[in-house]
Amino acid sequence: MKKVFILLLSLLAAAGLPACGGAENQGTPPPEEKEPVEITLWCYPVGDWGTPTAMSKLVTGFRREFPDILLSVEYPDYDTGDAKVNEAIEAGNAPDLVFESPERLVAGWGDRGLMADLSDLWAEDHSEGIYDAIRSACRHNNGEYYVYPLCSSAHCMAVNYDLFQAAGALQYLDAENHTWTTEGFISAVNALRAYGQERVGAVYCGGQGGDQGTRALVNNLYGGVFTDSEHTRYMADSPENAQALQLLRDLDGIAFDPELAGKGEIEQFCRGELAMAFCWNCTLEVMHTVKNPDLDFRVLPMAFPTSSGEPRLQGGIYGLGVFDNGDEERVAAAKAFIRYIAGSEEAYTRAVQMSNNWPVKDGENIYANDALMTEYSLFVPYVGDYYQVTPNWPAARTAWWTMLQKVGRGEDIAQALRDFDAEANGPLGAA
């Protein structure tokens, strides 16, 4: 019996428990459990970032690394997303994280002083090697960074290869290099019309959705510009842009459509109703061709036609921005999610591949065996500078599609362009 008692005392001592005595001998009470930090991420539909199934793996990995942060995800679309974010801001309930581009995160909400500075993330090792042009686009003119970039794209256009072939229009483009001239574009449209294709292309202007396509089309045709080289003001009012708009209005087969935005144009193209789409990129090809068993024609992506022989495409930069909701813990938790992706090779690779875009720095050939991404990589050298951070960007986007509507109604093109510059520059003064 004595041996049993001694053994019991030994076990209690090893377990760190008192053998007897009152509360004063119970030891230090365990620390109180910390309440988890709850944050929200809103993902615009960039590739599979707008797909809950694909996002689940990324979110699950983060939750394993940071169990004290509860991350929930919502999926706004481009038709209503901006309005929903602005409603949430007005209600004092803005999301903590948003996955989108500098045009919204820097030139939009950043200009309104709503975003948290991410300069500390840019100073860390995982930011080394990010391209200078992308770095510049993510920094506000006040010196603060409002975007941490993950991937980039090259917006282009596309043609119905089978229809072009049947109409004898393939001769007017360089299918190997995916380029063509303005004269080739005109000849191709005429050939398609002669073949019986009445609706060749649509200059959609029912809203801002996909407006990067119509801007690139107009600017490339005769070498026009959209802003000055320093991206301080809008300069669409030029003879080159006026000539391009006149051509588009006069060319049979091309129609200005005030009821159509980019999404609708893509849908009509994929149904075979249009012979070409001005709103296109690699992500859209994956969505509407690779994953669309009903598509019954081949798609050929193309740079925009140009008189100079050197197309200038608009690039997209996509990354994460953090709203400053006045809660330091939530801001820190949101930054933890960014660090998780940027600092993990596995997470970063998954995040980029989900977007169907390219990394924002060299040394990461994550599409080595992907034929589609290799094809679209031909467009990367054509990407021009990122002008979407010019002041008054939201106002400029609205002014652009309303200008196209004026041109489509037959109003004076020169005056429509003057009106655009005045509206877009706003407080900066009319051009």
Image (tube, rainbow, N blue to C red):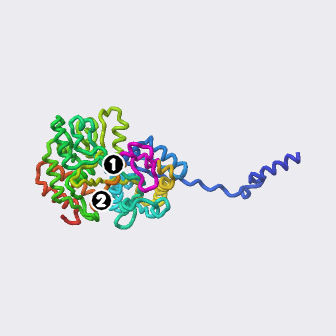
Question: Which dot, 2 or 1, sits closer to the camera?
Answer: 2
Q: Is residue 83 magenta?
A: no
* Residue for point 72% across, 58% down: 24
Q: Which residues are magenta?
A: 350-375
Considering depth in this image, is 79 or 410 the residue closer to the camera? 410
Q: Which residue is mark 1?
A: 81
Residue 387 is marked as: 2
The N terminus - image quarter: top right
Name the amino acid, label 1: Gly
On the image, the x and y values in percent for residue 303 come to 28, 49
Q: Is residue 202 left or right of residue 322?
A: left
On the image, the x and y values in percent for residue 400 come to 22, 54
Considering depth in this image, is 333 or 145 the residue closer to the camera? 145
The C terminus - image quarter: bottom left
Mark nearer the N terminus (2 vs 1): 1
Residue 201 is marked as: none
On the image, the x and y values in percent for residue 175 come to 29, 43
Compared with 279, 123 (above or below) is below
* Residue for point 42% across, 59% down: 130
Compared with 255, 380 (above or below) is below
Name the amino acid, label 2: Tyr
How packed mark 2 is, by other alpha carbons closer than 10 Å (few <14, some 14-19, many 20 or more), is many
Considering depth in this image, is 117 or 190 the residue closer to the camera? 190
How packed mark 1 is, by other alpha carbons closer than 10 Å (few <14, some 14-19, many 20 or more), is some
On the image, the x and y values in percent for residue 156 come to 29, 48
